[in-house]
Image: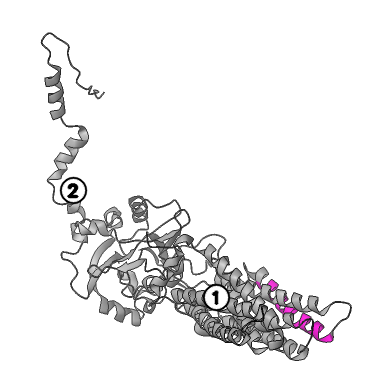
Amino acid sequence: MASVVQPKSPVLTEGFDLVQFLLEEQQDLTAVERFSQRHADISSPLMAPMYRELLPAEAPRPGEQYAFEVDLDACSGCKACVVACHNRNGLEPEETWRSVGLLQGEGECATVQHVTTACHHCADPGCLRGCPVRAYEKDPVTGIVVHLDDQCIGCKYCTMMCPYDVPQYSEAKGIVRKCDMCRQRLDVGEAPACVQACPNQAIRITLVRQDEARTAGANGEFLDGAAHPSTTNPTTQFVGSTRKIKLASGDQFSIRQNHGHLPLVALLVFTQLSVGAALAGCLWEAHRLALFLIATGFCAIGLAASGAHLGRPFYGYRVFLGLRTSWLSREAIIFGKYFPAIALATASFWFQMYTPIGLLLGWAGVAVGLLGVFCSIMIYVATRRPVWGPIWTGERFGGTVVLLGAAAAMAADSGERLLVVPIAIAVIALTATRALLEYRFAAKADDDFANPFTRTKYLQSHSLLALVRARNVLWGLGGVLFPIAWMLENHQVPSIIIAATGFLLLTGAELLDRFVYFASESTPSMPGVARSGEHG
């Protein structure tokens, strides 16, 4: 049994000198101090001999950067790297910066391959381009993509811009976080946590040329089952004998519903409705005030709702910092100018003062609003996700502007009924056009579950089926049945109730459509592992 060391105590004898005793006691070192003194003269980490060969022998030269290299033959899927990364960085229970996926053969090929992945520290990182507050930096020397936690406002746009689902949102902190290759360790010659923890030395840090990474990305050379590399030109090097075999992601038949982003749903639909109503108000003098009231009210609701999407809304003022690179910054700034323009125009029409100036402000607001809608479209087009392409996103968002603008005109004209037939026919035609777009979109799907359109169609016909059906019913009622009833002028039901109900039903349909737009996006990112209950 180990003996317990007791602290020295003074022996009170004749001639005992307490001062001398205390001075001698102060010269003794505590266990912590002795440990620190022993390691003070060590110039390199104690475990360096174990991983020295897993690090580059020299720093990156101009045009080079650090990158992960993964030996697929050595990866056993033990997840020691995942645990080490989690513990080293103090992550939350559900937060992971490194994960282990699976590649498997198809048909008669029985190959099973584990894959460990983290941030690829891309040559042209999408997260950096998209961030509206410049919370990402690419180190000019090492090439490591670093996230600045104190700068982040938690908008989560980088999670859309990254095709590999690398940035992780922390609900507790209200910000996004990601792997930084343990750069503090690399700065002192120590290996990252994942490199040290792997028992098979499957992970190492290597040097790559950024121009070669871009060439490989343009040629589609990366990893089976992953998103196409041309989007961001990832630098991670995957090596091993299985690279010669065509493999599929282990979770290619596991299709998970994406986040619905309710605040963004409200922002997009209500700002687009507002622009459509303001445009109708500029064109139609008889109901200009009513249409501008609708435009101002719904714009205010949409802008207020957008704040709920930020993890740190009180820092939202930083959004202008990314104006040069981020479409999100541009959208926020432009709609910030749009609202006061239409609000002033509405006030001018309300008080019947300076009407020409009010109309000028109205047209200026419409022009700015249309530019804002264009920025909204580009926010999602810039992610380069196929189902959010320019055609599909442009027709959806633009369709909402004209459809709800016409529906707002129907509601505004419900009492006087000045242009009943033209407006009703326009609403019906625009609703039919929106439905035709959905048919064309569904036709892009096939039997290949690696096809993003197939995955989206699967979600819309399974977990999102109830919402899709509800949207279609609301389109039919608000966009066809109620406009017809409004034209027929049933005296038993006031026209204002019919027209206003049709307008609200169409608005509800567009809200559901925008939720489905987000929730059904399922572009493959990196190889994963199939989960029960999630399959095609």
Q: Earlier in the sequence, mark 2 or mark 1?
A: 2
- Kindly give the residue lying farthest to the front in the view shown: 353
Task: Kindly state the secondary structure of the residue where label 1 is placed.
Answer: helix
What quarter of the picture does the N terminus occupy? Answer: top left
Q: Amino acid at mark 2?
A: Leu
Q: Nearer the viewer, residue 367 or 102?
A: 367
> Which residue lies at the image location 18% right of the left edge and 48% below the top edge?
46
State the image quarter where residue 536 is shown. Answer: bottom right
Q: Position of residue 221 (x, y in %)?
A: 34, 78
Residue 452 located left or right of residue 79: right
Q: Main secondary structure of the magenta part?
A: helix
Asked if one can make out residue 293 in the rendered structure from this viewpoint, the answer is: yes
Give the extent of the magenta segment.
468-488
Residue in the foreground of this view, choosing between 126 and 51: 126
Residue where numbered disc 1 is placed: 340
Residue 272: tell me if it is visible: no
User: Are there few (<14), some (14-19), or many (20+) residues within 10 Å of tag 2?
Assistant: few
* Magenta region includes residue 147: no
The disc label shown at residue 84, or none: none
Question: Label 1 amino acid?
Answer: Pro
- Tell me how far mark 2 sits from mark 1, CA to CA: 63 Å
